[in-house]
């Protein structure tokens, strides 16, 4: 129910600036990149701020990663995973301190590529989005 309310508020609000941006920026690329990290066993997942907005990014993450609202709200734990607010970070990559030793994956935009080098990370493109995986995780 919580996910539906968040999604509805963000997606269908005619005055929401992100609704207008979604017309210009296809979320298909974002969804493909998001699905590519779904089965990652990385401890942390960093998802960049994007034109579709943080609220929509979060709702799409909950939906495509098939996460329950109680996990999102911190009411339950999933074995082997950090709590939602510790595992998932929605932020501009430039505002983060990227720790190469951290067990993490990143969903970024092309503008964020400058923060990652291909000799340390595997980078896979999904339209305007990229999935970045530390080579040590292979």
Image: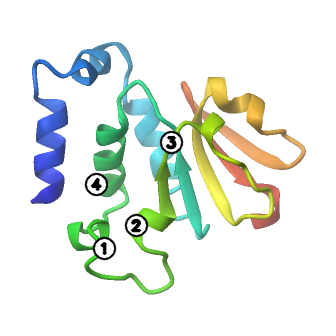
Give 82 or 127, whichever is nearer the viewer: 82
The answer to whether 23 is drawn above or below residue 46 in the figure is: above
Q: Say how the picture is coloured.
A: rainbow
Q: Quadrant of the C terminus?
A: bottom right
Mark nearer the N terminus (1 vs 2): 1
Q: Nearer the viewer, mark 2 or mark 4?
A: 2
Q: Are marks 3 and 4 in contact (CB under 8 Å)?
A: no
Residue 15 image point, x, y percent: 13, 18
Mark nearer the N terminus (2 vs 4): 4
Secondary structure, mark 1, is loop
Mark nearer the N terminus (1 vs 4): 4
Q: CA distance from mark 3 to mark 2?
A: 14 Å
Q: Which residue is depicted at the point 61% across and 48% down?
A: 106
Residue 77 image point, x, y percent: 36, 82
Horizontal side of 103 relative to 38 (left or right) equals right
Give 124 or 83, whichever is nearer the viewer: 83
Q: Are marks 1 and 4 in contact (CB under 8 Å)?
A: no
Query: Residue 103, can we see it?
Result: yes
Identify the residue under disc 4: 63
Mark nearer the N terminus (1 vs 3): 1
The label shown at residue 1 is none
Mark nearer the N terminus (3 vs 4): 4
The label shown at residue 84 is 2
Secondary structure, mark 4, is helix
Give 96 or 52, whichever is nearer the viewer: 96
Horizontal side of 29 relative to 118 (left or right) equals left
Mark nearer the N terminus (3 vs 2): 2
The label shown at residue 91 is 3
Residue 93 image point, x, y percent: 61, 38
Q: CA distance from mark 1 to mark 3?
A: 19 Å
Identify the residue under disc 1: 74
Q: Which residue is depicted at the point 80% across and 64% down?
A: 101
């Amino acid at each position: 129910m919580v996910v539906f309310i968040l999604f509805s508020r963000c997606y269908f609000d005619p005055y929401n600036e992100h609704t207008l941006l979604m017309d210009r920026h296809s979320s298909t690329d974002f969804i493909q990149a998001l699905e590519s990290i779904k089965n990652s066993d990385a401890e942390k997942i960093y998802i960049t701020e994007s034109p579709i907005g943080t609220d929509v990014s979060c709702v799409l993450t909950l939906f495509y990663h098939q996460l329950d609202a109680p996990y999102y709200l911190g009411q339950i734990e999933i074995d082997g995973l950090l709590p939602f607010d510790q595992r998932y970070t929605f932020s501009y990559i430039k505002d983060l301190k990227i720790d190469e030793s951290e067990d993490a994956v990143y969903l970024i935009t092309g503008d964020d590529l400058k923060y990652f080098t291909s000799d340390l990370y595997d980078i896979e493109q999904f339209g305007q989005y990229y999935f970045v995986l530390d080579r040590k995780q292979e």
